[in-house]
Image (tube, rainbow, N blue to C red):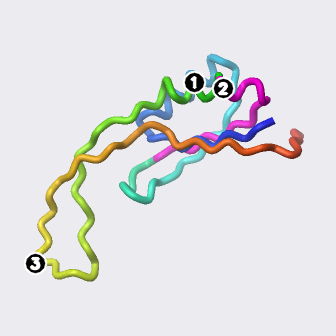
Amino acid sequence: MKLIVAVVQDKDSNRLSQALVRENVRATKLASTGGFLKAGNTTFIIGIEDERVDPVLNLIRENCKSRQQMMAPMSSMGGNADSYIPYPVEVQVGGATVFILPVERFEQF
C-alpha cells in the first residue's frame, strides 16, 4: 500500500476530484497555500494499493496541467522601496507535485 500526497493548484482541483470519484479512488482534500506565489492549492491525500498507483498518477497527470501566468515579484524588505520597480514576470504554475510514500500499516474505523 502507498500514500500519495498530491499538491494541486486550485484551478485543477475540481477536475481531478471528479476524475478520482469516477475511478472510485477515495481521497481526502485539504486546503493549502503555496509559498512562492502565495496562491491557493489543494492537497489530496490518497491511500491506494500498490497496483493502482500508476493509474492514479495518470489521472493526476491528465487533470493537472501546468500553464504560464504573469505575476509581479515581491519587493525586497531590506532594499530601498524607491528603487524597486515591480515588473511582471511570467512563471509556470499548475501541474502537480506528488509524493509517494510506503504505508507500513493501515487501519480504518
The question of residue 103 being in magenta is answered with no
Q: Secondary structure at mark 1?
A: helix
Which quarter shows the C terminus? top right
Q: CA distance from mark 2 to mark 1?
A: 6 Å
Query: Pointer 3: what residue?
Result: 82
- Residue 94: % across, % down: 41, 39
The answer to whether 53 appears left or right of 37 in the picture is: right
Figure quadrant of residue 59: top right
Residue at image x 51%, y 28%? Answer: 61
- Residue 89: % across, % down: 21, 52
Q: CA distance from mark 1 to mark 3?
A: 48 Å
Which quarter shows the N terminus? top right
The amino acid beneath tag 3 is Asp
The amino acid beneath tag 1 is Asn
How many numbered discs? Answer: 3
Q: Secondary structure at mark 3?
A: helix
> In the rendered image of this protein, does residue 87 appear above or below residue 25?
below
Query: Pointer 2: what residue?
Result: 54
Which residues are drawn in magenta?
41-54
The amino acid beneath tag 2 is Asp
Residue at image x 72%, y 45%? Answer: 101
Figure quadrant of residue 49: top right
The answer to whether 69 appears left or right of 81 in the picture is: right
Query: Pointer 1: what residue?
Result: 58
Q: Earlier in the sequence, mark 3 or mark 2?
A: 2
Pointer 3 local density, CA inside 10 Å: few below 14, some 14–19, many at least 20: few
Q: CA distance from mark 3 to mark 2?
A: 52 Å
Pointer 1 local density, CA inside 10 Å: few below 14, some 14–19, many at least 20: few
CB of mark 2 within 8 Å of CB of mark 1? yes
